[in-house]
Image: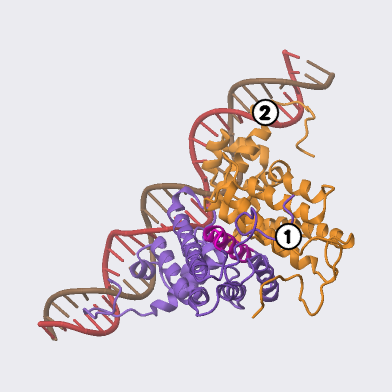
Chain colours: A purple, B orange, C brown, D red
DNA sequence: AATTTTCCATAGTGATCGATACGAAACCTG
DNA sequence: CAGGTTTCGTATCGATCACTATGGAAAATT
């Protein structure tokens, strides 16, 4: 907590920390970690380099704080959807529809910062790429946890791998993030989400699937 | 065709062009366009800077040629699946299963170069990011064309938007690309693909859906 | 007011970025 | 062989990268 407000004397900061962090977050969101130069940050944040470094240590720390702020301010829909007192199917539906909206907000960069931030990276930025992967994996784990709860409550079949299904849902969200970046509209993403939902096992109490149905796979002949 | 083999005199090239291009392709595939420095390329290709620039003009041209080579050598599964004389459902199945395998080949970078190459980019590299988006859009268009063919042949319902469904399929593939980069195994991706297939409308001749079913969306209650 | 503490602004650090100048070497045609 | 052409290896180029040294200005403490 070195960043707290304890006034220990000295000249007060002449700019707003959160406002500067927001500007940095949006820039990282748009261009990714490595492609965002300090010159761009300087202009977007309206600060001089020493101001940035005094407040945020270095570029990597700034990015990590931007990640935290993104997590807090931009993707509340996810935690909300996964913790809402609704059925499992409805929770996943809210999650995907929420993603459709969050990934295509007017005035915001398209897609998800966790995906756009650093999918590929130079060897020097491997730590950042790993950090982002950790965020993505945490999201997937949160989905899996919600599915496990649904399975325990009878919303989902017993013979279902929550990890597999979570990987599908997280994968669809990642794909939506790219489609958003490629110009997909909110409606486009909503339809995509709706389509993806059709792959979920039909809701209803624990109808153990018959024969040798593998995982939760669907209605299409398997060839 | 400046790169052809017409021997017009002069000192012969001391290295193999395709081999060098392959090395560059794999490096771009792993680290993306901007994060791949000329020093890295130099080492991976086993060449000096003048050799690289004489053969490939500049970094951007080198990347574009690497893209073409990737298209020719690494993703034949897609064209194959979409042009095979099989049902539409089977074609999409082959496409997704093929992607599962292509995105997780041992000894190759995970995911798809079209996605990893430059999801986010600096302003200077916007042209590259646009080029990659064009490749992704072309893939989506190819899927849409195959779906349209299937619709015309009665494989798919009449009241179905091929663009919407193509966007879903392409989105799933993009998502698989990211999951592959996050360490998903071939089996993981195959299961994901199989799950995604369950969202497709049941195959069979043109059973025009009843009531007000929107697009092709599925079996789950819509809230 | 004196002291301390922190921040601000200017200017510039070494390192790395993509890309080249130069001249010698190696091939073709005559 | 001479003349022309292309690639070779060596040694860089200026620009930009993330980052900071320095010194004075401003506000809180004493």
Sequence-earlier tag: 1 or 2: 2
Label 1 chain ID = B
In depth, the one of C8 and A72 nearer the eye is A72
User: Label 2: chain?
Assistant: B
Q: Say whether residue A23 is visible.
A: yes
Q: Position of residue B78 (x, y in %)?
A: 74, 49
Q: Compared with residue B66, is residue A99 higher up or lower down, i.e. above or below?
A: below
Residue B170 shown in magenta: no
- Measured as percent of width and height from the top left, residue A42 is found at 46, 69
Distance between the alpha carbons at the discs numbered 1 and 2: 37 Å
Secondary structure at badge 1 equals helix
Picture mark count: 2
Dot 2, how many residues are within 10 Å of its Cα: few (below 14), some (14-19), or many (20+)? few
Task: Evaluate whether residue B129 shows in this view.
Answer: no
| Magenta stretch secondary structure, dominant | helix
Q: Which mark is residue B13?
A: 2
The residue closer to the viewer here, A167 or A28, is A167
> Where's the N terminus of chain A, which quadrant?
bottom left
Mark 1 neighbour class, 10 Å CA radius: few under 14, some 14 to 19, many 20 or more: some
* A166 magenta-colored: yes
Q: Residue B100 — which label? A: none
Residue tagged by mark 1?
Answer: B137
The image quadrant of residue A192 is bottom right
Looking at this rendering, what residue extends furthest in the right direction?
B153
Is residue B166 rendered to the left or right of residue A30?
Answer: right
User: Do marks 1 and 2 share a chain?
Assistant: yes
- Mark 1 or 2, which is nearer the eye? 1
Q: Position of residue A166 (x, y in %)?
A: 54, 62
Q: Tell me what residue is drawn at x 42 percent, y 54 percent.
A: A127
Residue D5 image point, x, y percent: 75, 30
User: Residue at horizontal 52%, vertical 53%?
Assistant: B182
Which residues make up the magenta segment?
Answer: A158-178
């Amino acid at each position: 907590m070195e960043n707290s407000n304890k006034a220990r004397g000295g000249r007060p900061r002449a700019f707003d920390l959160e406002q500067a962090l927001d500007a940095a977050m949006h820039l990282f969101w748009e261009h990714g970690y490595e492609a965002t130069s300090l010159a761009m940050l300087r202009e977007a944040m309206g600060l001089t380099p020493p101001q940035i470094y005094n407040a945020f240590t270095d570029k990597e720390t700034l990015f990590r704080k931007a990640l935290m702020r993104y997590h807090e301010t931009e993707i509340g829909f996810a935690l909300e959807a996964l913790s809402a007192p609704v059925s499992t199917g409805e929770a996943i539906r809210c999650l995907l529809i929420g993603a459709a909206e969050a990934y295509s907000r007017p005035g915001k960069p398209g897609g998800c910062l966790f995906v756009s931030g650093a999918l590929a990276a130079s060897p020097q930025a491997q730590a950042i790429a790993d950090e982002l992967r950790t965020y993505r994996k945490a999201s997937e784990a949160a989905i899996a946890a919600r599915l496990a709860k649904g399975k325990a409550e009878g919303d989902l079949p017993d013979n279902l791998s929550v990890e597999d299904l979570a990987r599908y849902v997280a994968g669809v969200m990642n794909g939506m993030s790219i489609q958003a970046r490629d110009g997909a509209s909110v409606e486009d993403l909503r339809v995509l989400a709706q389509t993806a939902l059709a792959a979920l096992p039909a809701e209803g109490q624990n109808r153990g699937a018959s024969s040798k149905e593998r995982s939760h796979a669907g209605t299409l002949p398997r060839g």
